[in-house]
Image (cartoon, rainbow, N blue to C red):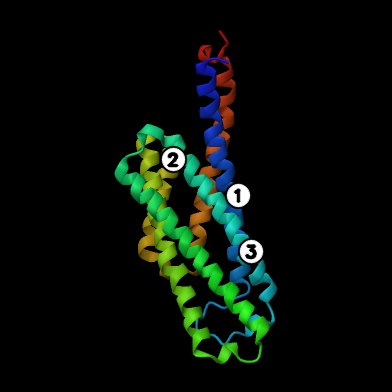
Amino acid sequence: MNEAMRQTSHHLRTPRAAAIAGIVFAVLLIVVMALFLSSVPKDPLERGAWLSIHAGKVILAVNLVPFAGVAFLWFVGVLRDRLGQAEDRLFATVFLGSSLLFLGMLFITAALFGAIVAVHAARPEGIADTPAFSVIRAFAFILVNVYAVKMAGVFMMVTSTLGLRTGFVARWIAFLGLGLALALLFGSQLFDWSFAVFPTWVLLMSGYILVDNFRQLPNAALSPSATPD
């Protein structure tokens, strides 16, 4: 296999890997969100009645978060590899920084809920009445619904801008990402399911990349540069 064939194979596999990782991340995060929202009341000052009813669903969500995180890291890494020399240093810094901050805050939130459930399992009689429980619940609520959502919006904005500059996604998806990113940055507190915007957009972008990659397979096979010496 000559150098042209190796380069063609690499450029076909890279977007496919990014798309698959993005789809896995989006699906897992949507499942995690559905489990949390159907189990834990929105009010951060509630008294913890869900601990006796929905603890199993919360534990399942907590255990799914690391797998979503690994898929997200793979998604980010493959996108950076796809951009290659076209990646600007400024955008690269914000792109990587916002993704790591988002992921870190997501992990911290999951760990806080896991700790609450673990302590309740050991001492079910009194955790909900302690000041620490109220502080941890309020902290987790603010962390994920304010800070993590904002970092997701920054990631969407930078990724969409890179998409417009390099053309690795359709322009309409990039413009949609910019609009949704602005909505998350300035209006996420106005609707309860704002956190779902991010994985839904990643799922849309990943689906487009995957379909576009398969469309390129016949063209690559017929290209003169893909023929052996």
**Nearer the observer, disc 1 or disc 2?**
2
Instruction: Please state which of residues 205 and 69 is positioned toward the viewer in this rendering.
Output: 69
- The residue shown at (36%, 38%) is 87
On the question of residue 8 being in view, the answer is yes
Classify residue 61 by image quadrant.
Answer: bottom right
Q: CA distance from mark 1 to mark 3?
A: 15 Å
Q: Is residue 206 left or right of residue 98?
A: right
Sequence-earlier tag: 1 or 2: 1
- The residue shown at (60%, 70%) is 36
Check disc 1 and give the amino acid type.
Answer: Val
Q: Kindly indicate whether the residue at mark 3 contacts the one at mark 2 (C-beta within 8 angstroms).
A: no
Tell me the residue that label 1 is attached to.
24
Sequence-earlier tag: 2 or 3: 3
Q: Furthest-front residue in view? A: 122
- The residue shown at (32%, 39%) is 88
Q: Residues within 10 Å of mark 2 (few under 14, many from 20)?
A: some
Looking at the picture, does residue 174 appear above or below residue 53?
A: above
- SS at badge 3: helix
Tell me the residue that label 3 is attached to.
63
Q: CA distance from mark 2 to mark 3?
A: 27 Å
Q: CA distance from mark 1 to mark 2?
A: 18 Å
Looking at the picture, does residue 13 appear above or below residue 20?
A: above
**Nearer the observer, disc 1 or disc 3?**
3
- SS at badge 1: helix
Q: Where residue 162 appears, x then y in whole percent?
A: 37, 41
Which labelled disc corresponds to residue 80?
2
